[in-house]
């Protein structure tokens, strides 16, 4: 099982690093392209928004392919997009390249997650999802700090490294992953679950939680300036601690949701995240307190996505590809809006990057309140499955077409 899941985790690691690494390189990108730091931050926003909006479309277009082929096509576009980004010499070219890269990335996370869910037995599904999503969280633990360190030789170097990771993931999938065929769904089928209040409520929680996180995280490099004195090595250390906490939270989340109510696990994570964000202006004044703050916030952030995916799959196991695809879009909508909100707060209200913490905390509290509301919404009477082929039983037939 590990041999099959490892290339999927590497694929999500490449996507996560690509989405996160820009945040650690904003000052150098802004200087090189001749734009302000908030303007450079919109590269994160546009990437995430394009990914969110294109995910249902690319999912529908690749729905008839087995998951291995779909992942290879998506990774091909992803690698080319990153290469063009690294070669870009103007803000417009780099922005356009980020759009292309996001289109390729849009099909990767959901395809990798649905494949993991299909390969794993029901009693280990939480851990399988956590392992594959561990690629995303590992990208914050290693990808972002290493990318920031590599970016010291030029931010383009970090993008070339991401392209290399995507190519390596594609090779691993081609060699180790079996054919996994899941029920195909049209674009209309993929949008149909949005008519159900419980599904829409869960997706809103995902978006709000990530919006709160990325209101601050998009501008993490300038936020850490006082604590690190502008030192690249100290900044890398803080990012490594933050990312390690996120990875630890992700690993813990997989085990927690297999043993406890995913709703309770998510509640605890959101409470801790809101408290950490509210304390940001005080915590990032000195390096020791920043390291503690980063570890705590990282653990909370790392827990959030796994219980959300687990809850969505529980609503309709046979519809996992559709529901996880929507959750992936909701996740990146939150990232995009967070980057935009953080930029607007700095431009319109003159907030320093560290002062974005309380704003992010308020959004996280809103996510918590909405989460509590969704726990009282009625579950759908029928799973949100495509009309054809017939719905397989949860945890058995969903894994049957593997060759």
Image (spheres, rainbow, N blue to C red):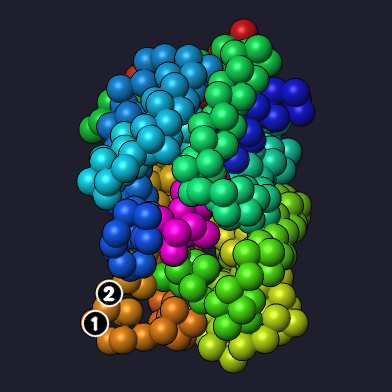
CA gap, disc 2 and disc 1: 6 Å
- The label on residue 344 is 2
Where in the figure is residue 174, as x and y percent of width and height?
A: 59, 13
Please give the residue where the numbered disc 1 appears in the rendered image: 348
For the C terminus, give its image quadrant. Answer: top right
Q: Main secondary structure of the magenta part?
A: helix
- Quarter of the rendering containing residue 288: bottom right
Q: Quadrant of residue 231?
A: bottom right
Q: Residues within 10 Å of mark 1 (few under 14, many from 20)?
A: few
In magenta, the rendered stretch is 16-29
Q: In the displayed structure, would residue 385 be above or below residue 36? A: above
Residue at point 61%, 79% (across, down)? 229
Instruction: Give yes or no for contact between labels 2 and 1 (Cβ–Cβ under 8 Å).
Output: yes
Taking 359 as reference, is 140 left or right? right
Q: Quadrant of the N terminus?
A: top right
Left or right: where does residue 46 sit relative to residue 291? left
Location of residue 198 with respect to 59 vertically, above or below? below
């Amino acid at each position: 099982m590990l041999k099959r899941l490892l290339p999927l985790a590497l694929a999500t690691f490449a996507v996560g690093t690509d989405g996160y690494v820009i945040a650690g390189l904003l000052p150098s990108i802004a200087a090189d392209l001749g734009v302000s730091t908030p303007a450079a931050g919109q590269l994160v926003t546009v990437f995430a928004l394009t990914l969110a909006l294109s995910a249902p479309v690319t999912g529908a277009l690749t729905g008839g392919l087995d998951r291995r082929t779909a992942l290879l096509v998506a990774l091909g576009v992803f690698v080319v997009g990153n290469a063009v980004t690294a070669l870009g010499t103007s803000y417009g070219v780099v922005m356009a390249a980020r759009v292309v890269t996001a289109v390729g990335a849009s099909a990767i996370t959901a395809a990798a997650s649905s494949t993991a869910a299909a390969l794993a037995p029901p009693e280990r599904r939480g851990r399988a999802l956590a392992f594959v999503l561990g690629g995303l969280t590992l990208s914050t633990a290693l990808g972002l700090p290493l990318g920031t360190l590599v970016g010291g030789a030029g931010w383009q170097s970090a993008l070339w490294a991401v392209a290399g990771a995507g190519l390596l993931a594609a090779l691993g999938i081609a060699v180790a992953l079996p054919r996994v065929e899941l029920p195909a769904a049209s674009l209309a089928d993929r949008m149909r679950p949005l008519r159900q209040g419980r599904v829409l409520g869960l997706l809103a929680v995902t978006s709000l939680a990530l919006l709160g996180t990325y209101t601050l995280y998009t501008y993490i490099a300038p936020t850490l300036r006082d604590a690190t004195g502008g030192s690249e090595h100290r900044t890398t250390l803080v990012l490594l601690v933050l990312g390690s906490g996120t990875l630890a939270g992700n690993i813990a989340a997989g085990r927690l949701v297999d043993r406890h109510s995913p709703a309770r696990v998510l509640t605890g994570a959101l409470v801790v995240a809101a408290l950490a964000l509210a304390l940001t202006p005080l915590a990032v004044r000195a390096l020791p307190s920043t390291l503690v703050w980063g570890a705590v916030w990282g653990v909370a952030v790392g827990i959030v996505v796994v219980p959300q995916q687990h809850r969505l799959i529980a609503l309709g196991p046979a519809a996992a590809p559709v529901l996880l695809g929507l959750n992936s879009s909701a996740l990146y909508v939150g990232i995009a809006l967070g980057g935009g909100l953080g930029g607007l707060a700095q431009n319109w209200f003159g907030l320093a990057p560290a002062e974005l913490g309380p704003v992010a905390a308020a959004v996280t509290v809103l996510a918590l309140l909405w989460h509590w509301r969704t726990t009282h919404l009625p579950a759908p009477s029928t799973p949100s499955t495509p009309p054809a082929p017939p719905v397989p039983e949860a945890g058995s037939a969903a894994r049957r077409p593997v060759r």
